[in-house]
Image: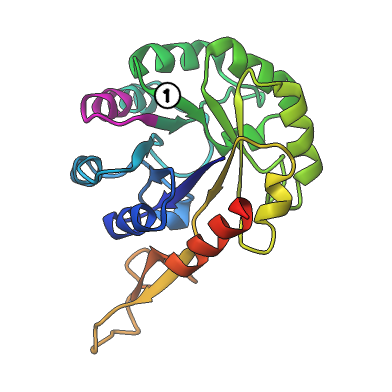
Amino acid sequence: METELCAYSLEACETARRAGVTRVELCASPWEGGVTPSAAAVGMARRIGGLQLSVMIRPRGGDFLYTDGEFRQLLEEVRFAREAGADCIAVGVLTADGRVDAARMTEVMAQAGGMEVTFHRAFDLVRDRREALETLVGLGCRRVLTSGGRATAAEGIDQVRALVGQAAGRIAVMAGSGVKPSNARMLAATGVDALHFSARLLRESGMTYRNPDVSLGGVPGVPEYASVGADEAMIRQILFQIER
């Protein structure tokens, strides 16, 4: 079974390599659910040996209905990831009525060239997942990342299992969201082809002086003096659960 770490830093990528994870999905901005990482981060991650690299392609946070300008940017990000040598991209484009935007995704697939394409959790926001899965099969996507239309994959496990049955090997199904050691084996037993997890760890800043009166992002609850890392011990526990 493939494993994929949602990585928000180069350090997390190195952690994934040490632990034996198959692939990283490199993202930026964890508090928005992940957006396209910087060019420098992509280039440096590509130089980490023994690890497949998937690059998140998402020009902004929020929904997956893009303006013409945002979609042009998205295509440029796909082009850059391809030229940087990424193995895969994670992307998703929807129509206003909650369906996979097949026309725009056809352009994405063409721009991706030889890279694998994962349709990310935009899939969990569609109105009809069975219809959407058939659309992705027709487009030639390599895999779909899903929590079964629920907040976590454990909550959506019955829907994940149904999608595996519907896919019947035509497209890989990767379960993600809330994957942890206590449920990894249960999720693997649905027959999914891969598990996606972040093993998120908050790393406290080394700053000794902290100004409590400033919030740079202006969003309550987002820590100003901590960054998101990956917990190597938790990663190894997840891998142990699905390999035993």
Q: Per the image, is 85 magenta? A: yes
- Looking at the image, residue 117 sits to the left or right of residue 157; the answer is left
Q: Residue at x 41, y 52 (%)?
A: 20
Residue range in magenta is 76-88
As displayed, is residue 222 above or below residue 194?
Answer: below
Query: Seen in the image, is 38 located left or right of residue 132?
Result: left
What is the x, y in percent for residue 219?
Answer: 45, 65
State the residue in front, 38 or 166. Answer: 166
Residue 102 sits in quarter: top right
Instruction: Name which residue lies at 34% across and 82% down.
Output: 213
Foreground residue, 178 or 32? 178
Report the magenta stretch's main SS.
helix
Per the image, is 137 magenta? no
Circle 1 residue = 116
Circle 1: residue type = Glu
Residue 171 lies in quadrant: top right
User: Which quarter of the figure is the N terminus placed in?
Assistant: top right
Question: Residue 29, position in %: x, y?
Answer: 38, 53
Q: Quadrant of the C terminus?
A: bottom right
Q: Residues within 10 Å of mark 1 (few under 14, many from 20)?
A: some
Q: Is residue 187 visible?
A: yes
Instruction: List x then y, in percent, for residue 185.
Output: 69, 53
Residue 212, placed above or below residue 202: below
